[in-house]
Image (spheres, rainbow, N blue to C red):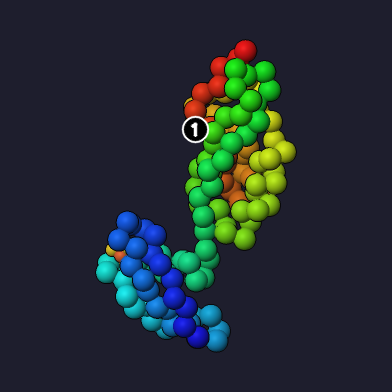
Amino acid sequence: MQRNIICVACPMGCGMTVEVAENGEIISVKGNTCKRGDAYARTEITNPVRSLATTVKVDGGIYNVVPCKSAGALPKDKIMDCMEVINKAEAKAPVKLGDVLIENILGTGINIVATNHCPEK
Ligand code: SF4
C-alpha cells in the first residue's frame, strides 16, 4: 500500500510517498529532501503525534482563559479526548507562564502548561 503525505518538519513541505507492507512495516520513503522527512514519515505512519495549543478556563483571573499547550507531542488518536479534558478544566488565578495546568493528561506522560500569565482580578 502507498500513502502520500506532506512533510511538516520545515516550511518546504516536501510531498512524500511511503510504501507500507501489509504488516505495517515501512518498505520505503521517497520524495523527502532530507533525513528529517524520512523520520517524520516513519513516525506519521507508525505512531502519529501532534502538539496541542488551546486555552484553559481561569477562575478569578483578569481574563476568562489562559493560553496553553502540550509540553510534548500527544498521540494523534488521543487529541479529541485530551481536548475534552482541557475543556472541562479550570485553573485558579493567578496563573504564571509555564505553570502545569493539567499533569500527565490521560496518562500520556505529557503535561498541559500555560503559555502566558493570567493575574488575579
Ligand atoms: S523532507 Fe526535509 S526539506 Fe522536506 S519538508 Fe521535510 S524537513 Fe523540510
What x and y, as percent, mark residue 120? 60, 14
Q: Is residue 41 left or right of residue 81?
A: left
Q: In this view, does 56 lie above or below 73?
A: above
Q: Which corner quadrant of the image does residue 119 belong to?
A: top right
Residue 94 in view of the camera: no
What's the residue type where badge 1 is placed?
Answer: Thr
Q: Which residue is drawn at the image coordinates 63% and 56% (left, top)?
A: 78
Q: Which residue is drawn at 52% across and 63% down?
A: 48
Residue 104, how many percent across, how many down? 62, 44
Q: Which of 66 and 37 is in front in this view?
A: 66
- The location of residue 82, given as percent across then percent down, is 65, 48
Quarter holding the C terminus is top right
Expressed as whole percent of the image width and height from the top left, the position of residue 97 reads 49, 27
Q: Where's ligand 1: which quadrant? A: bottom left
Q: Which residue is label 1 attached to?
A: 115
Query: Residue placed at 57% from the left, 59% from the top?
Result: 76
Q: Residue furthest top?
A: 121
Badge 1, how many Cα within 10 Å: few under 14, some, many 20+? many
* Residue at the (61%, 29%) spot, across then down: 65
| Location of residue 36 (image quadrant) | bottom left
Q: Which one is in front, 99 or 68?
A: 68
As drawn, 99 above or below 22 = above
Helix, strand or loop status at disc 1: loop
